[in-house]
Image (cartoon, helix red, strand yellow):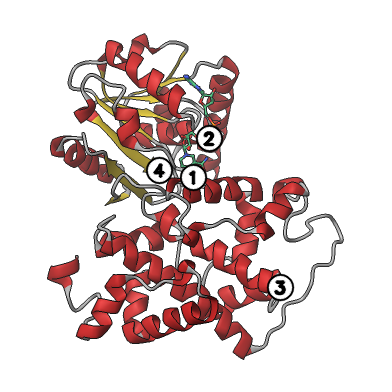
């Protein structure tokens, strides 16, 4: 099957590399010739580096590159079986592009979007045959990240969903199926990792260094929330938080934090600007964490219970299955453990008690306990004992 990729920015180029590595001919189109040139140069560099590191041999690298056709118009999409769109995150632009695509591609061609935050149903609505439109959400960088979220819209046919899942798994990825709701699985469930960390800082009982130390050394996360926000870019992370908050009709659970806004306002965008929550300039001295174990444990549990609550609510609202929610967080954002597995280990009743204690203290709906957790605690169930009911 020939694969079409639309948009040759960081995601499009990465997706083209993945598909070509899996043996497909790939037609990579971008409306900007400079972006195409950058993608071509970038891909050559990456493939050469893989050869230098001994991951692939030279003929393989050449064959992968040779399978990618860089084109300046979409007419070459006429023989494609699947198009993956990775252009700017703008609903009107995406809708217009999908509408035009239908005139070019074969009737049975699947049209996928890599959108992170837009409704797949809205994009599909631009097509005469919306049943062939689906979300295929790769993570950045696409060649390295194992997880891919597959998002059928309400219009998408089951056959299209199944075909995509099988194909992307053949490409060596782990797929999870997510409902077409804001943030899908990962970007929804992970919100408290940043949001609750900011809240703790806002309340003043720990600084960034201490929270990061606790989450890394005690919680076992690969990076603390502030280090990670600096890495992602505070502007980007703040924008995602705002988008999710709006998309959830201003549910207080997703409310952005002034801590985030302030660093963005100040231009402290993270590593890329030399300063974020930390100072990355040469010779800069950053604050040392307060390695008080009691404080550290308290920080980790407060953030973790909020993550667990979010994961439980995602299951409750049937955003995805138990296994897909745990896989998504383990493979999409490298959490040390699936959150629902973690909930079982911590004790469902303990999770409920902590959420209720937080709610009593703050009287904010942000801290409301998921009805699923409460029901499970009442019935003495755990996530992994009740496989048939919840998986
Ligand atoms: N960057 C990430 O971490 C990430 C992760 C997952 C999903 N996404 C999603 O993937 C998509 C692309 O993101 P990106 O980071 O690669 O963006 P990017 O800005 O790096 O690249 C977008 C490319 O699309 C091209 N483009 C814009 N409009 C076009 C059009 N009408 N026709 C053809 N080409 C057009 C631009 O020239 C540009 O080269 C977005 O929907 C984004 O939400 C991004």
Q: CA distance from mark 2 to mark 4?
A: 11 Å
The answer to whether the residues at label 2 and label 1 have Cβ atoms under 8 Å apart is yes
Residue 112 in the figure: left or right of residue 29: left
The answer to whether the residues at label 2 and label 4 have Cβ atoms under 8 Å apart is no
Label 3: element kind: loop
Closest to the camera, between mark 4 and mark 3, is 3
Label whose residue precedes the other's in the sequence (2 or 1) = 2
Q: Which residue is mark 1?
A: 140
The answer to whether the residues at label 4 and label 1 have Cβ atoms under 8 Å apart is yes
Res. 6 visible in picture: no
Label whose residue precedes the other's in the sequence (4 or 3) = 4
Q: Any atom of ligand 1 within 8 Å of the CB at mark 1? A: yes
Res. 195 visible in picture: yes
Q: Any atom of ligand 1 within 8 Å of the CB at mark 2? A: yes
Q: Is residue 69 above or below residue 115?
A: above
Q: Which residue is mark 3?
A: 207
Q: CA distance from mark 4 to mark 3?
A: 33 Å
Q: Which mark is residue 84?
A: none
Q: CA distance from mark 2 to mark 1?
A: 8 Å
Give how far across and how far down residue 218 sits, in percent.
Answer: 55, 81
User: Crowding near pointer 2: few (<14 within 10 Å), some, many (20+)?
Assistant: some
Q: Which residue is mark 2?
A: 10
Label 2: element kind: helix
User: Crowding near pointer 4: few (<14 within 10 Å), some, many (20+)?
Assistant: many
Name the residue nearer the viewer: 45 or 164: 164
Name the residue nearer the viewer: 169 or 356: 356
Q: Which residue is mark 4?
A: 138
Q: Quadrant of the N terminus?
A: top left
């Amino acid at each position: 099957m020939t694969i079409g990729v639309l948009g040759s920015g960081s995601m499009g180029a990465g997706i083209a590399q993945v598909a070509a590595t899996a043996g497909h001919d790939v037609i990579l189109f971008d409306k900007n010739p400079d972006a195409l040139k950058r993608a071509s140069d970038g891909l050559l560099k990456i493939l050469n580096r893989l050869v230098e590191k001994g991951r692939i041999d030279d003929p393989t690298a050449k064959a992968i590159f040779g399978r990618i056709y860089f084109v300046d118009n979409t007419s070459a999409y006429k023989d494609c079986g699947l198009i993956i769109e990775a252009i700017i995150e703008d609903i009107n632009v995406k809708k217009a592009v999908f509408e035009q695509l239908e005139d070019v591609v074969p009737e049975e061609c699947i049209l996928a979007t890599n959108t992170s935050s837009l409704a797949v149903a809205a994009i599909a609505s631009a097509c005469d045959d919306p049943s062939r439109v689906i979300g295929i959400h790769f993570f950045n960088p696409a060649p390295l990240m194992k997880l891919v979220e597959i998002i059928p819209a309400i219009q998408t046919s089951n056959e299209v969903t199944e075909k995509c899942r099988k194909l992307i798994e053949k490409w060596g990825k782990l797929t999870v199926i997510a409902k077409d709701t804001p943030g899908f699985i990962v970007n929804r469930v992970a919100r408290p990792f940043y949001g609750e960390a900011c809240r703790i800082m806002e309340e003043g009982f720990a600084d960034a260094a201490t929270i990061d130390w606790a989450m890394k050394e005690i919680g076992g996360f690969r990076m603390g929330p502030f280090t990670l926000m600096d890495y992602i870019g505070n502007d980007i992370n703040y924008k995602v938080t705002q988008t999710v908050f709006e998309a959830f009709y201003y549910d207080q659970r997703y409310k952005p934090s002034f801590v985030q806004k302030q660093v963005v306002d100040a231009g402290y965008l993270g590593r890329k600007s030399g300063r974020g929550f930390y100072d990355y300039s040469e010779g800069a001295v950053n604050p040392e964490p307060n390695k008080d174990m009691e404080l550290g444990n308290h920080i980790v549990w407060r953030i973790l219970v909020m993550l667990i609550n979010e994961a439980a609510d995602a299951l409750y609202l049937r955003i995805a299955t138990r296994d897909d929610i745990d896989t998504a967080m383990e493979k999409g954002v490298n959490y040390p453990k699936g959150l629902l597995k973690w909930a079982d280990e911590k004790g469902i009743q303990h999770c409920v008690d902590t959420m209720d204690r937080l709610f009593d203290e703050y009287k904010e709906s942000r801290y409301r306990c998921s009805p699923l957790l409460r029901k499970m605690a009442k019935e003495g169930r755990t996530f992994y004992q009740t496989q048939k009911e919840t998986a």
